[in-house]
Image (cartoon, grey):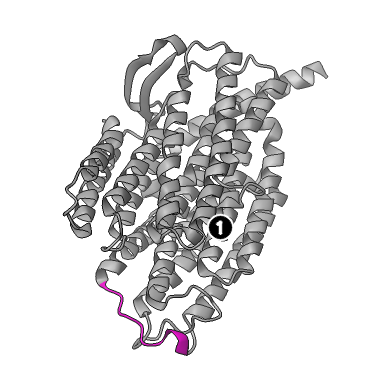
């Protein structure tokens, strides 16, 4: 069942690539949306058949591949990866449907989007370290091309910077994975066969450091974040939706799956440092966002800050905080995707993202009142207003982290206040007041352009009002992860005290 999430979009990419040259862009988009829709529908079927009470991997698939190095085709899904799979499939549909109908080189463009979909899905279901790394690298190529070909004026610089950073991330992650397997004595790269408790604490910390840096680049965390604002500003709107909504989650997923889960002893020792690192990312991202005049750059820097909340919850490693990290991944994916969609609509209709130029877009007659209303909703969700999914995700992270790291949690809560500040600046400057002369006589926003944003807004409100519909799939898995971590960490502390 899980292989369909990989091969259906790949099949769509191949078929689109071999379409006759006479096929127009609109038909190509419908074909791409058909395959993306099938993939999303399949994730919904998995969601319905998934048993959240089981903490083991479900729908597993195993096929021997390269026996000489112990590399197997091994797939599985649990409560940590399942919500991310659904999010990936949903946002891929959103990205395709929000693409301009007259996009140039449509066959190549939609093929790359579907390959990206397959690569991300493969990474989330891979139960083999090398298989994960393969899919992790696969998503790099289409995203680089999507920025380099369909990006803005500085697309070459932004795409190259993204490529370099992500390539370095992959090298560090691969080195850490090889070290995990060889030093643990495992004969395969399967996650289930890795036993790292016998490694010395110094070795575990060294391996964990590689995992934290490798996936920290992908998240990204300060100071490995500088590629993200450039990539977002130069990328097209659909690519920004996928970049913020899904691709950053490969970093957060990797830190939980391969950091905390595989190296709990080392994690317990570095956790205080990680909590402080989270504070730095939250406050730095928020401070940079306040200083921006470009709407897209402001939203991009906000992502850096919100990734810090995930790191804080992971560092605390309580049942509530780990549940909160997963909810924050989904929350940020939905909210950031909505905001980038709306910023894209504003830029398309006004020709500018500069907050010094744009004014009064909520004007009911000559502005964009529905787009502005959706932006206000997105801003409220990102700032953690009750009734939105952003509030419940951040609240659970803070509630679960406060008992372990009260000072760091309070400082991160300051970041939520700063989020309200910079998004208040955005909405006040761009949407309220009198309509500025520079953006008068705006083209109308069609319902087809609004529809993807409305879908995301509905999910944001639904999960904010009824978060259990999201949490029930994840909580048993995250609780089991914390129980395992707590047991190992306690044994480690007892041994350390005995030696002292």
When the figure is inspected, residue 430 is found, relative to residue 295, above or below; the finding is: below
444 magenta-colored? yes
Total marks placed: 1
Going by the picture, which residue comes out furthest to the right?
500
Nearer-the-camera pick, 75 or 133: 133
Q: Is residue 211 visible?
A: yes
Q: Residues within 10 Å of mark 1 (few under 14, many from 20)?
A: many
Nearer-the-camera pick, 151 or 172: 151
When the figure is inspected, residue 386 is found, relative to residue 201, above or below; the finding is: below
Residue identifier under label 1: 229
Q: Residue at x 38, y 72 (%)?
A: 348
- Give the quadrant of residue 171: top right
Q: Residue at x 31, y 75 (%)?
A: 445
Q: Is residue 78 visible?
A: no
Image quadrant containing the N terminus? top left
Residue 106 on image: x %, y %: 28, 54
Residues drawn in magenta: 437-446
Q: Secondary structure at mark 1?
A: helix
Mostly what secondary structure, the magenta segment?
loop
Image quadrant containing the C terminus? top right
- Give the quadrant of residue 489: top right
Residue 103 on image: x %, y %: 30, 60
Going by the picture, which residue comes out furthest to the front?
21
Q: Residue at x 56, y 50 (%)?
A: 307
Residue 487 on image: x %, y %: 60, 24
320 lies left or right of 467: right
Residue 483 on image: x %, y %: 54, 29
47 lies left or right of 402: left
Q: Residue at x 28, y 65 (%)?
A: 451
């Amino acid at each position: 069942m899980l292989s369909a999430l990989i091969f259906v979009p790949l099949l769509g990419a191949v078929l689109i690539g071999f379409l006759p040259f006479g096929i127009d862009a609109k038909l190509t988009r419908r074909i791409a949306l058909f395959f993306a829709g099938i993939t999303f529908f399949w994730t919904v079927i998995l969601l319905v058949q998934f048993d959240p009470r089981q903490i083991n991997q479900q729908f597993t698939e195993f096929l021997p591949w390269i026996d000489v190095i112990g590399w197997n085709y091994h797939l599985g899904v649990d409560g940590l990866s399942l919500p991310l799979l659904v999010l990936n499939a949903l946002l891929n549909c959103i990205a395709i449907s929000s693409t301009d109908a007259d996009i140039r080189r449509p066959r190549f463009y939609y093929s790359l989007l579907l390959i990206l979909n397959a690569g991300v899905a493969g990474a989330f279901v891979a139960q083999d370290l090398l298989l994960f790394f393969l899919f992790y690298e696969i998503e790099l190529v289409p995203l680089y091309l999507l920025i380099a070909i369909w990006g803005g004026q500085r697309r070459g610089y932004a795409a190259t910077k993204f490529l370099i950073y992500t390539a370095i991330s992959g090298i560090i992650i691969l080195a850490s994975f090889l070290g995990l397997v060889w030093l643990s004595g495992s004969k395969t790269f399967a996650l289930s066969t890795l036993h790292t408790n016998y490694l010395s604490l110094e070795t575990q910390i060294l391996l964990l450091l590689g995992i934290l840096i490798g996936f920290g680049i992908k998240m990204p965390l300060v100071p490995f974040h500088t590629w993200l604002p450039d990539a977002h500003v130069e990328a097209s709107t659909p690519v920004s939706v996928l970049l913020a909504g899904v691709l950053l989650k490969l970093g957060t997923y990797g830190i939980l799956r391969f950091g905390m889960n595989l190296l709990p002893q080392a994690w317990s020792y570095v956790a205080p440092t990680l909590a402080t690192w989270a504070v730095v990312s939250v406050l730095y991202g928020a401070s940079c966002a306040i200083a921006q005049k470009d709407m897209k750059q402001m939203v991009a820097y906000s992502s850096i800050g919100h990734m810090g909340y995930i790191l804080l919850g992971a560092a605390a490693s309580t049942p509530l905080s780990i549940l909160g990290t997963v909810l924050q991944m989904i929350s940020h994916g939905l909210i950031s995707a909505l905001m980038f969609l709306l910023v894209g609509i504003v830029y398309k209709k006004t020709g500018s993202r500069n907050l010094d130029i744009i004014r009064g877009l909520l004007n009911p007659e000559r502005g964009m009142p529905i787009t502005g209303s959706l932006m206000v909703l997105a801003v409220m969700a990102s700032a953690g207003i009750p009734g939105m999914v952003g509030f419940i995700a951040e609240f659970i992270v803070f509630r679960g982290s406060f008992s372990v790291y009260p000072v760091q949690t309070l400082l991160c809560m300051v970041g939520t206040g700063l989020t309200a500040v910079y998004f208040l600046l955005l909405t006040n400057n761009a949407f309220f007041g009198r309509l500025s002369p520079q953006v008068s006589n705006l083209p109308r926003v069609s319902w087809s352009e609004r529809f993807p944003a409305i879908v995301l807004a509905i999910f944001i409100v639904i999960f904010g009002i009824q978060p259990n519909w999201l949490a029930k799939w994840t909580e048993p898995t995250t609780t089991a992860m914390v129980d395992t971590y707590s047991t190992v960490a306690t044994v480690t502390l007892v041994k350390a005290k005995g030696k002292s």
